[in-house]
Amino acid sequence: MKLHRSLVIAVKETLSQIFEGGIYADKAVEQVLKQNPKWGARDRRFIAETTYEMVRWWRLLNEILGTKKSSFDYNGLLGIHFILKDVELPAWDEFRELNKQQILEKAEQVKKIRKFRESYPDWMDDLLVNELGEESWEREACALNTEADVVLRVNTLKTKKELLQKMLLDQGVVTHAIAGYPDALKLEKRVNLNSVKEYQQGLFEVQDASSQLIAANLELEPGMFVIDACAGAGGKSLHIAAIMKNKGKVVSMDVEDRKLKELHRRADRAGVTIIETKPISISVITTLKEKADRILLDVPCSGLGVLRRTPDSKWKLNQDFIASIKHTQQTIISEYSQMLKPGGIMIYATCSILPSENQKQVELFLAKHADFKLLSDRKILPSEGYDGFYMAKLTRLSV
């Protein structure tokens, strides 16, 4: 691989936006690519992949360099990254002081310690050891540093999986079915899906395999009244509507109006007509008390199960936020559950791997709400191949 100065400079600018400007990695990468529309696919891929790798291994690189993170020595950190990737450094002034042999020796030494080797802050490493155990966290810490697969969810309102797979293959997009996931197709390699006509026509959505299990476990039937109370931009709402064959009613709620507007756009593309959006409020909850056949609570969480997609969260999360989000989770499940009718089914879900956000939250809820019963729960860890998540299925008892 030959390094080009303009592309390396673009990576440095993107890293500065992430670590000094506080911008999320995906937005920072998107921003720099938009500013340079003439770059080809290979250049764009280099910038995106290098940026994400730098963010993912930020602590490891800093430990090898021997500086504090606040120094932001992007030249030194990039040089170390390229050396570890066995990329020959050009004779640029930026890399002149780097000694390859010394760096490789230092890397070997630093990697003996997990929090450096796998690149996590002290508090996060300690927390996950405490909640998962040393052996389990060792495995998950490594898995969360791998690149996430791109998984599609076939929109069964418009097409069938085998037909979509053939249509994509005709355009050179190779996909593979995933056993146990009826609507999922995994890309063999990354492509720009926005330009794929089947995406523009609403024949599929991008949705991780783990996420697809949630709606599938709601025991949905056409004609039901379903509430997706933390809908966000509505990926799971769209899946719910598809399983219900676009018959019945789905009320999708969120605290952010911009996300609900995006859901409307996505629903139009997908051909979904049964979704109604509402900003969540106490008055709405009161109005809908004991009305829903099914409720999905995909609650805000730490996101520790999806760090392979959002590696900058390792450096932006903190313990105060996690403590606060646990309080929010308990408030949501306690208040929003009142919209479920007796005999109905509710799913509490997170994309966290912390038991304190998952099983323990459900246990706390059940201890205070005798009219609810746990039917089943399931966790998927990142080492199993897809996003880490937790899902608990509960029912409301008839009194």
Image: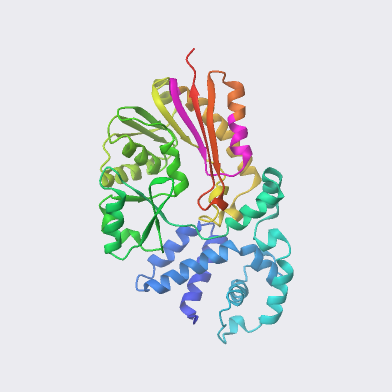
Q: Is residue 326 left or right of residue 107?
A: left
Q: Which residues are magenta?
A: 339-362
Image quadrant where residue 325 sits: top right
Residue found at x 71% / y 50%: 134
Magenta stretch contains residue 360 = yes
Q: Vertical placement of 17 versus 214: above or below?
A: below
Is residue 273 among what the camera can see?
yes
Q: Is residue 355 left or right of residue 388?
A: right
Most foreground residue, 181 or 210: 181
Is residue 20 among what the camera can see?
no
Q: Is residue 243 left or right of residue 385?
A: left
Residue found at x 42% / y 46%: 181
Magenta stretch contains residue 151 = no
Most foreground residue, 166 or 310: 166
Q: Position of residue 265 (x, y in %)?
A: 30, 45
Q: Is residue 61 left or right of residue 43?
A: right
Q: Vertical placement of 265 versus 70: above or below?
A: above
Q: Position of residue 319 (x, y in %)?
A: 65, 45
